[in-house]
Image (cartoon, rainbow, N blue to C red):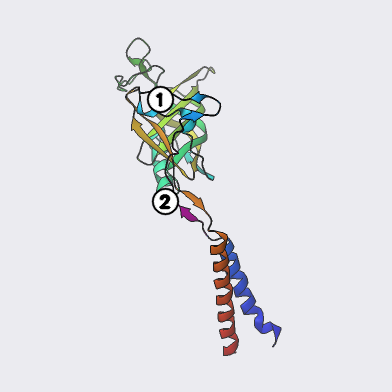
Amino acid sequence: MDLKNLNPLISLIVYLIIQFIIAKPTVESRKHLPQRPDKDPKMGEMPLSLSSPLERQPSLLVVPPSGSVTAHILRLHPGESLMASLRSAADVILARIPPSRCSSVFVMTAVGSLQDATLRLANASKKNLPNAGSSESVGSSRGNDICRWRQRFEIVSLVGTFSRNGGCHLHISLSDSEGKTIGGHLIDGEVFTTVEVVLGTADGVEFIREHDEATGYRELLPRQLPKESRPGWWVRSGQLFLAVAFGFSVGASILRRR
């Protein structure tokens, strides 16, 4: 038999083997959250706090491991709303990813400038309303303020998380023309020249928000999604056998036609 006639068969077999190797993993179902142990090897008994549903499980135990982290880069243009644009970008990113794979978005880094900024300062309560159009504080005189500044700032830092259900929590630090820095909970901002943002997603993790009676806000509750894993060796062996057999069958058929 002329070896040249085997080229189509060999190419097909190699192609099938490559497809088998890079095949997508299957999904192994398991519970979202690990069960809370009664004891910790180092800390002993771990009492529960009843002041808030989110505090009933020690924070160190509510840290689900993540899978691959993917970066998503975007640029905001002059005059755009910082908060609205970030929310929209997070929604677009999550719409591209199956909920079973990822339901978490977070800010990896950001740089740029604003010409209008509204922040909620430290110790603020939900009673403060962002209805001011000046650069002075609005609300309580005891520091529970939401402030708006109509001036230019450089973004020093921007951090936060987004959920698939539309929830988000963002903090920002801004530097003025004299290098003085302010920061707080981001209510909104207007882009001056540009804002370059890198958003990240973590496979296998879901960010949800539930009401916390202790704070009065919907607070973050991370959950682990079903774990992805590759099939067992017996499944992979069977797939490889079927791929090779199919390749020989198709190759033989091609040779007979010649």
Amino acid type at mark 2:
Pro
Left or right relative to 30: residue 134: left
Is residue 100 among what the camera can see?
yes
Query: Is the Cβ of the residue at disc 2 closer than 8 Å to that at disc 1?
Result: no
Residue 38 location (% of width, % of height): 45, 30
In the rendered image, the vertical position of residue 10 relative to residue 120, given as above or below: below
Question: Which is nearer the eye, 239 or 197?
Answer: 239
Q: Quadrant of the C terminus?
A: bottom right
Q: Residues within 10 Å of mark 1 (few under 14, many from 20)?
A: few
Residue 155 location (% of width, % of height): 50, 27
Residue 11 location (% of width, % of height): 63, 74
Secondary structure under badge 2?
loop
Amino acid type at mark 1:
Leu
Left or right relative to 230: residue 136: left
Which labelled disc corresponds to residue 65?
Answer: none
Residue ID at (62%, 70%): 14
Residue under numbered circle 2: 98
Residue ID at (45%, 32%): 160
Outermost residue on the top side: it is 142
Which labelled disc corresponds to residue 48?
Answer: 1
- 25 in magenta: yes
What is the CA distance from the residue labelled 2 to the residue labelled 1? Answer: 35 Å
- 180 in magenta: no
Residue numbers of the magenta segment: 24-35
